[in-house]
Image: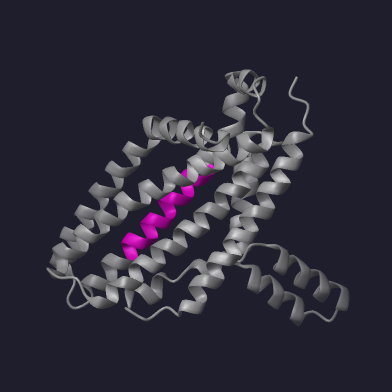
Amino acid sequence: MRPIPGIVAINTFREAVRDRVLYNLIVFALMMMGAAILVGEISIGIDRLVIINLGLSAISIFGLVMAIFIGVGLVYKEMEKRTLYSLLAKPVRRWEFLVGKFGGLVLTLAVNTLFMTLGLAAALFYVSRQFLSTDATILVAIYFILLELALVTAFALFFSCFSSPMLSTLFTLGIYVAGFFSADIRGIGTVTRSPAMKATARVISYLLPNFRNFNVISAASHGDAIPFSLIWQNTAYAALYVALVLIAASAIFSGRNLK
């Protein structure tokens, strides 16, 4: 018998595919084809740079929207349809349910990202008629985007354990924006004359997820090499942070009275 989180993950993936992913892929494919044709007509010498920047940014934005707006409803929708109660009446632990939901949405995002990557590759081939060895950095950038989306999904699931979908969306967006500017928050603390403010800003900046470390779109568009050390550091950082957020979500969800 398959592990329970795996069963929940597969069911979550199937439901997400039926509901939303197809439309997202169609919009992305049309956008990339239109951008490729437009860039091929008006750009001189920067067509590849524009396409890579546009494609990676679109993958990141589309993925972020999916991670938040699907993630915040994973628990709430099950409660609203009352399917959660019948599921938990079986020998299913609440943490297994959460981990399964997380895995299903991450799988959905990975498949979605794969197809959008193929769309980006097609657009890139259209404008340049070739692939370069430096294009391997594009795959690294996409991998970092997936790590970022996994972390956003974990936060969306965390907030959905105790809040409404609207508030969960606002909280997750707030964490994402604050995390993207976490280094700037630390910088604000250094320019103040208050030691307490400086210490507080430093603590907040370190507690927030540093999403800026996952953004290598500019390096990928210019074909710059990405150090292997950054790859494993980002992987370990995302894995640890996701684990901590899921543990916190499981603790809150396990103590919640669902009656």
Horizontal arrangement in the rendering, residue 110 relative to residue 191 (left or right): left
Q: Position of residue 42 (x, y in %)?
A: 16, 68
Q: Which segment is the magenta one? A: 53-68
Horizontal arrangement in the rendering, residue 259 relative to residue 114 (left or right): right
Please identify the quadrant where the C terminus is shown: top right
As displayed, is residue 234 above or below residue 191?
Answer: above
Is residue 58 covered in magenta? yes
Give the residue displayed 82% in from the left and 74% down from the top: 199
Q: Position of residue 60 (x, y in %)?
A: 42, 57
Q: Quadrant of residue 208?
A: bottom right
Residue 73 in view = no
Q: Nearer the viewer, residue 157 or 47?
A: 157
Q: Nearer the viewer, residue 232 or 81?
A: 232
Q: Position of residue 130 (x, y in %)?
A: 15, 70
Give the residue displayed 43% in from the left and 54% down from the top: 61
Characterize the magenta stretch by its predominant secondary structure. Answer: helix
Identity of the residue furthest to the front in this view: 1
